[in-house]
Image (tube, rainbow, N blue to C red):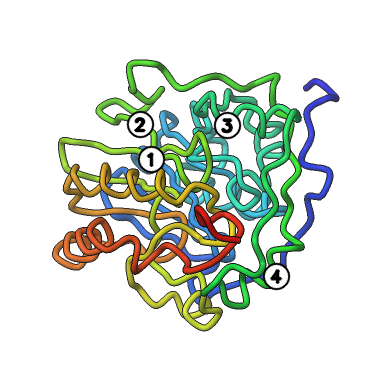
Amino acid sequence: MNEEMHQSEDNKAIPMTSVSSGKGREVRPDVYYYTNQIVNIEMVGFPGQNNWVLIDAGMPKSAKEILSSAAERFGRNSRPSAIVLTHGHFDHVGSIVNLIKDYQVPVYAHPLEFPYLTGQMAYPEPDPKVQGGGILAKLSSVYPIEPVNIKEVLLPLPEDHTVPYMPGWEWVHTPGHSPGHVSFFRKSDRTMIAGDAFVTVRQDSLYKVLMQKAEINGPPNYLTTDWQAAWDSVRKLESLQPRVAVTGHGQAMQGEELSEGLGRLAREFDKIAIPEHGKYVDGKD
């Protein structure tokens, strides 16, 4: 691989965990998610087969753990057809370079995320003082924000909204948490992989993150920079009426709990998700 490919210059292990860390769960016969510390990565494809896709690349310094989880699911010598990213924040690309080196596969993302994935631009700094951010926001000043550089293997998601190597799935542009954030939806069984467009654990509570208490919330508020776009994205996802959803943080959710919680979030996003004050809240500082 080209020597120019590298993780972010501030990439470092972050000491966070939850009761779900190290556990994997199957939500459909071909949809599996694994919790790496506090973030979920998804594997789409049937167990024991080679034609599968890895969605997102976990926390920093976690490549061995992710490789082991995938090997347990698909076989020791199996590798994905591609890696597909919901977005490029540190907890979703923290181990991307080592995974690419091992798997030797392309990576797909929305073009609006490319500056953060090609070494060109750092993400805006987190807001550690955001209202309701809790301890995770206060810790956010140590989170990596510098860009990775995977230009050598990076490809844009197709303009027709299909997802490479994932027949029947479509990608949905869901900006707000980041400019090129995308979610994935399969209409045939209404399965959704939402990334951080919404999550199922309150990120402003260390206890709830640790214990993975399930409740639908907006995107992590200390890293969300465009709240109106984030609300529009939630409305867009709610209109698809998912039956099961895997999010970037928290446990998968389905049935009435999902439909009622997501419906309430779409209606009352300003009350539930948008902070009263913070440097990325429109018109406020």
Mark 2: secondary structure: strand
Dot 4 and dot 1 residues touching (CB under 8 Å) = no
Q: Residues within 10 Å of mark 3 (few under 14, many from 20)?
A: many
Vertical position of residue 78 compared to residue 151: above or below = below
Observer-nearest of 58 and 242: 242
Vertical position of residue 106 compared to residue 134: above or below = above
Q: Position of residue 277 (x, y in %)?
A: 53, 67
Q: Please state, as top left, top right, bottom left or bottom right, where the C terminus lies in the image.
A: bottom right
**Residue 183 badge:** 1
Of label 1 and label 3, which has the lower sequence position?
Answer: 3
Q: CA distance from mark 4 to mark 1?
A: 26 Å
Mark 4: secondary structure: helix
Q: Residues within 10 Å of mark 4 (few under 14, many from 20)?
A: some
Q: CA distance from mark 3 to mark 2?
A: 14 Å
Mark 1: secondary structure: strand
Vertical position of residue 268 compared to residue 163: above or below = below
Outermost top residue: 159
Task: Between label 2 and label 4, give the one nearer the viewer.
Answer: 4
Mark 3: secondary structure: helix
Dot 1 and dot 2 residues touching (CB under 8 Å) = yes
* Amino acid tagged 2: Trp
* Amino acid tagged 4: Leu
Of label 4 and label 1, which has the lower sequence position?
Answer: 4
* Amino acid tagged 1: Ser
Dot 2 and dot 4 residues touching (CB under 8 Å) = no
Q: Position of residue 244 (x, y in %)?
A: 24, 54
Outermost front residue: 283
**Residue 113 badge:** 3
